[in-house]
C-alpha cells in the first residue's frame, strides 16, 4: 500500500513514485496538520516539522494563545472564523448566521483504486495503479462532516485532492466557500508560474516572484477562461527547466476558479485552489452532500520539465478517455478560416474534393450551417440545417463527402441562444438573465439557462437528432461568450449562488450524454479559441482547440504555455493560410506544418484557392504527420529554447518512451545576421546509446547530443524552421 497510517505518531504517509506527502493528527483536539510534500523520504515521523514543541502550541492545555496557534499552524484544510487569518478553504453560514467552522479529525479509510467524483470529471485509476485515503473531519457544533479525499498514483509523482462536505445536522447550512486544497509550504523564496492570456493569445507563460500578501489568478467568467488557466506552479526561485523543486497545481474544473499563493507573516507560503467564492454559495440541506472538484498536484525535483512530463503521463493515462484516447486522430480540414459563414454544399464539396487528393481525411463544417445563420447575429439554438445553404440537406452533403473519400465533422455551440432565433422567440426565459433587466449581449448572443432540465433536454435532443441523421464522426463543441447577468427563474433566491456551478455540472452532463450515446465520436472542445482548455474538458474530449490564432509564431508561445501542463496530442493545431487572419503575418508554409505537428495537426484554409506551391507541400506534411504522430502523441516532451526568453529562436523535442528516437523542432523566429550555427543540447536520451541523424546519417552518442550538443545551421530568413530526427542504432 502506498498510503499508510502510522498509529503511534498518528501520521498518514502517501508515497508516489518519488514523492511523499505527509499529514499528521496532533493534540488532544485532533487537529490535522500538513507535515511535508516533496521528494520521497523513508521516515514515518517527521512531525517536528509542525513545530508543536514551540510556543504557542498546545491549545487543549493553553487556551490563552489559541488564536496564535491557529494563525501559524500548517493546517491541512483551513477554515474560516477561528483564528487562522490566512486564506480559508471552507466558509459556511449556519441557520443563525454564524460563520465559524472548526475541523477535527474523526476517522479515516484507506483503499485501493479511486472512486469517481459524483457528476464531475476527475482522474481515474484502478486498484493496481493508485491508492486513496479519505480523512473525515467534523465540526462538532455545526454537525458538519468534511471528508478530505486523496489519491496517490503508484508510478507517478501525483497526489489528487477533493473534498466532500456533508450536513449531518437537522438544519440547512449555507456553504459560502469550498476550495478543494490547501498546503502551507515552509519559506517564501519561491516563484510562481501561471498561464496568462486573452483571446488569440492564450496561456502565455508568466513567471513572478512570490511576495508577502496574496497573489492569485482566477476566473469569474463562468468558464475557465482565456485570461487565466486553472493552473499554477510554485517553484524554487532558482528552479529551471531541469533543476529544482516545482509543484504544479491544476484544477479539474471548467468554471470559475481561484488559484492563490499567499506569503505569510512567519515566512510560510500558503497555496489554495478551488471554485472561486465570488458569486458562489451552496445551500446544503440536512443530510445532503456537496463535492468540491478535484485538484491535481504534481511534484518534480527536476524542475519544470519533469513536472510537465508527469502531467502529460497522468492525463494521457488517467484522465482522457474514449476511442481516440490512444489513437492517431484523422487529419481534418476545417472551413472556418476558409469561408467563414459564406459556404454552401457546392463550396464544401469542392474543398473536400481537393482535400482528398492531398491525403486529408475529414471535412469539418464549422459555424453557419443551421437556422438562417449567415453571420454571428442569429440562430443559435435552432439546430436545424439551413437547406438554402446546405442544398440537398445534411445527409446528402455527408454522403457526398464520404463518397469523395473523407469523413465528416460538424460544429455546434450548444450552450447559447441568439435573440434572433425561433428558440428565443418561443422561450425568452430560457436564457440566463435577471427578471426586469436587459441582459448584456456578447457576440449578439445569450447563454442558455442550463440549470433548467427542460433546456438541457431540449438542446441535447436537438444535437442528437442532427448527429443521428447522417454519418457524422466528429463534433466541435464551441462556447463563445462569458456569463453575465446571473439570474434564473428556476433558482430560488436562497440558491442564487448555485447558478454558476449548476451550469458547469449541466455542461458536464450534456457531454456525458453525448459521449455515452455516441462512443465513437471524436469530440473537440473549443471556446472562442482556447477559453476552456482545462482538465475538466479533457475528461470528455481528447482534444481542445488551442486558440483562434493560427499564426505559427504566435502559436509557439500559445502551445508552449499550453503544453506546460496539457499533452501535445490534446492541442488542436491547424495549418492556415497567410497572411494570417489574426496577425497579418506571412510565415513559410513549411514552418506552419512543423508547428501544427506538435498538436493534433490539420488544415484550416481554402485548399481550392491556395498557391500551387503550398498545395504541393501538403502531401509531404501529411506524410510527416503519419511518420511522427505516434511519437508526438505518446513521447516525452522537453523544452530546449524559448524565443520569448532569447528573442529569436525556439526549440523543443519529443523523445519516445523507450528512448529509441527523438524528434527535434527548431524555429528561427528572427534571422540573425553575421552569426554562426546555433548549438542546442538535446535531453532525455541514453548517454551510452548511439543515435543516427536520419537526414545526414551521422552518428553520435546520446551523451554527445545532450552534453556537447549539435549545431543547427543558421537558417536564412525570419520564421524558418527545421526538424531533426535521430534514431537509436
Ligand atoms: C470560435 C472558434 O474558436 C472558431 O474556430 C470558430 O469555430 C468560431 N468560433 C465559429 O463561430
Image (cartoon, rainbow, N blue to C red):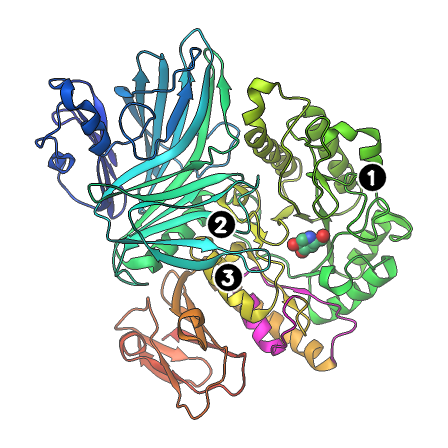
Q: CA distance from mark 2 to mark 1?
A: 32 Å
The residue shown at (51%, 61%) is 558
Q: Quadrant of ligand 1?
A: bottom right
In the image, 75 versus 62, the foreground residue is 62
In the image, 474 versus 192, the foreground residue is 192
Mark 1 CB lies closer than 8 A to ligand 1: no
Magenta part of the protein: which range?
582-611
Q: Residues within 10 Å of mark 2 (few under 14, many from 20)?
A: many
Is residue 410 positioned above or below 89 on the image?
Answer: below
List the residue tagged with mark 2. 228
Mark 2 CB lies closer than 8 A to ligand 1: no
Cβ atoms under marks 3 and 1 closer than 8 Å:
no
The residue shown at (61%, 79%) is 588
List the residue tagged with mark 3. 559
Q: Residues within 10 Å of mark 1 (few under 14, many from 20)?
A: many
Where does residue 130 sit, x and y in percent of width and height?
A: 34, 37
Amino acid at each position: 500500500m502506498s498510503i499508510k497510517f502510522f498509529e503511534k505518531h498518528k501520521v498518514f504517509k502517501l508515497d508516489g513514485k518519488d514523492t511523499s506527502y505527509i499529514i499528521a493528527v496532533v493534540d488532544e483536539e485532533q487537529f490535522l496538520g500538513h507535515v511535508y510534500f516533496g521528494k520521497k523520504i523513508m521516515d514515518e515521523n517527521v512531525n517536528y516539522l509542525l513545530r508543536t514543541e514551540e510556543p504557542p502550541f498546545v491549545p487543549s492545555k493553553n487556551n490563552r494563545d489559541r488564536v496564535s496557534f491557529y494563525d501559524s499552524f500548517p493546517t491541512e484544510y483551513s477554515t474560516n472564523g477561528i483564528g487562522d487569518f490566512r486564506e480559508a478553504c471552507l466558509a459556511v453560514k449556519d441557520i443563525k448566521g454564524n460563520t465559524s467552522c472548526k475541523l477535527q479529525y474523526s476517522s479515516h479509510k484507506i483503499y485501493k483504486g479511486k472512486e469517481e467524483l459524483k457528476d464531475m470529471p476527475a482522474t481515474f485509476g484502478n486498484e493496481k495503479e493508485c491508492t486513496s485515503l479519505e480523512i473525515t473531519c467534523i465540526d462538532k457544533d455545526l454537525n458538519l462532516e468534511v471528508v478530505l479525499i486523496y489519491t496517490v498514483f503508484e508510478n507517478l509523482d501525483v497526489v489528487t485532492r477533493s473534498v466532500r462536505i456533508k450536513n449531518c445536522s437537522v438544519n440547512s447550512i449555507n456553504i459560502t466557500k469550498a476550495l478543494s486544497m490547501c498546503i502551507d509550504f515552509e519559506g517564501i523564496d519561491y516563484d510562481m508560474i501561471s498561464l496568462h492570456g486573452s483571446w488569440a493569445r492564450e496561456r502565455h507563460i508568466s513567471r513572478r516572484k512570490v511576495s508577502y500578501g496574496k497573489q492569485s489568478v482566477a476566473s469569474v467568467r463562468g468558464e475557465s477562461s482565456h485570461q487565466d488557466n486553472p493552473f499554477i506552479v510554485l517553484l524554487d526561485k532558482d528552479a529551471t527547466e531541469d533543476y529544482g523543486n516545482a509543484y504544479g497545481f491544476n484544477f479539474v474544473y471548467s468554471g470559475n476558479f481561484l488559484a492563490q499563493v499567499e506569503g505569510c507573516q512567519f515566512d510560510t507560503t500558503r497555496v489554495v485552489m478551488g471554485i472561486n467564492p465570488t458569486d458562489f454559495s451552496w445551500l446544503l440541506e440536512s443530510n445532503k452532500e456537496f463535492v468540491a472538484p478535484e485538484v491535481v498536484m504534481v511534484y518534480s525535483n527536476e524542475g519544470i520539465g519533469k513536472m510537465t512530463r508527469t502531467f502529460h503521463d497522468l492525463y494521457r493515462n488517467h484522465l482522457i478517455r474514449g476511442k481516440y484516447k490512444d489513437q492517431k486522430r484523422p487529419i481534418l480540414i476545417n472551413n472556418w478560416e476558409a469561408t467563414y459563414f459564406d459556404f454552401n454544399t457546392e463550396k464544401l464539396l469542392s474543398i473536400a474534393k481537393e482535400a482528398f487528393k492531398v491525403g486529408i481525411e475529414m471535412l469539418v463544417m464549422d459555424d453557419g450551417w443551421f437556422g438562417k445563420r449567415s453571420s454571428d447575429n442569429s440562430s443559435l439554438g435552432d439546430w436545424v440545417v439551413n437547406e438554402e445553404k446546405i442544398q440537398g440537406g445534411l445527409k446528402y452533403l455527408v454522403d457526398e463527402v464520404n463518397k469523395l473519400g473523407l469523413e465528416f465533422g460538424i460544429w455546434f455551440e450548444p450552450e447559447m441562444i441568439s435573440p434572433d432565433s425561433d428558440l428565443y422567440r418561443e422561450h425568452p426565459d430560457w436564457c440566463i438573465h435577471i427578471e426586469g433587466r436587459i441582459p448584456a449581449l456578447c457576440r449578439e448572443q445569450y447563454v442558455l439557462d442550463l440549470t433548467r432540465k427542460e433546456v438541457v433536454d431540449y438542446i441535447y435532443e436537438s444535437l442528437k437528432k442532427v448527429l443521428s441523421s447522417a454519418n457524422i464522426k466528429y463534433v466541435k463543441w464551441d462556447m463563445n461568450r462569458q456569463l453575465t447577468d446571473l439570474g434564473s427563474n428556476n433558482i430560488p433566491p436562497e440558491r442564487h449562488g448555485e447558478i454558476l456551478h449548476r451550469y458547469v455540472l449541466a455542461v458536464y452532463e450534456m457531454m456525458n450524454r453525448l459521449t455515452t450515446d455516441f462512443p465513437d465520436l471524436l469530440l473537440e472542445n473549443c471556446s472562442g479559441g482556447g477559453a476552456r482548455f482545462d482538465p475538466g474538458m479533457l475528461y470528455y474530449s481528447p482534444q481542445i482547440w488551442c486558440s483562434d490564432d493560427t499564426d505559427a509564431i504566435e502559436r509557439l508561445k500559445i502551445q508552449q504555455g499550453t503544453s506546460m501542463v496539457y499533452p501535445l496530442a490534446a492541442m488542436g493545431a491547424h495549418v492556415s493560410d497567410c497572411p494570417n487572419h489574426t496577425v497579418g503575418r506571412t510565415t513559410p508554409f513549411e514552418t506552419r506544418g512543423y508547428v501544427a505537428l506538435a498538436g493534433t495537426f490539420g488544415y484550416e484554409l481554402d485548399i481550392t484557392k491556395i498557391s500551387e506551391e503550398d498545395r504541393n507541400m501538403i502531401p509531404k506534411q501529411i506524410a510527416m504527420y503519419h511518420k511522427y504522430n505516434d511519437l508526438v502523441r505518446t513521447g516525452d516532451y522537453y523544452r530546449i529554447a524559448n524565443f520569448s526568453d532569447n528573442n529569436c529562436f525556439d526549440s523543443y523535442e519529443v523523445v519516445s518512451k523507450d528512448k529509441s528516437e527523438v524528434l527535434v523542432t527548431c524555429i528561427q523566429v528572427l534571422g540573425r545576421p553575421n552569426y554562426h550555427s546555433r548549438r542546442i543540447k538535446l535531453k532525455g536520451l541514453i548517454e551510452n546509446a548511439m543515435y543516427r541523424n536520419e537526414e545526414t546519417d551521422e552518428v553520435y552518442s546520446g551523451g554527445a547530443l545532450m552534453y556537447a550538443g549539435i549545431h543547427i545551421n543558421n537558417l536564412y530568413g525570419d520564421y524558418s524552421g527545421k526538424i531533426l530526427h535521430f534514431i537509436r542504432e
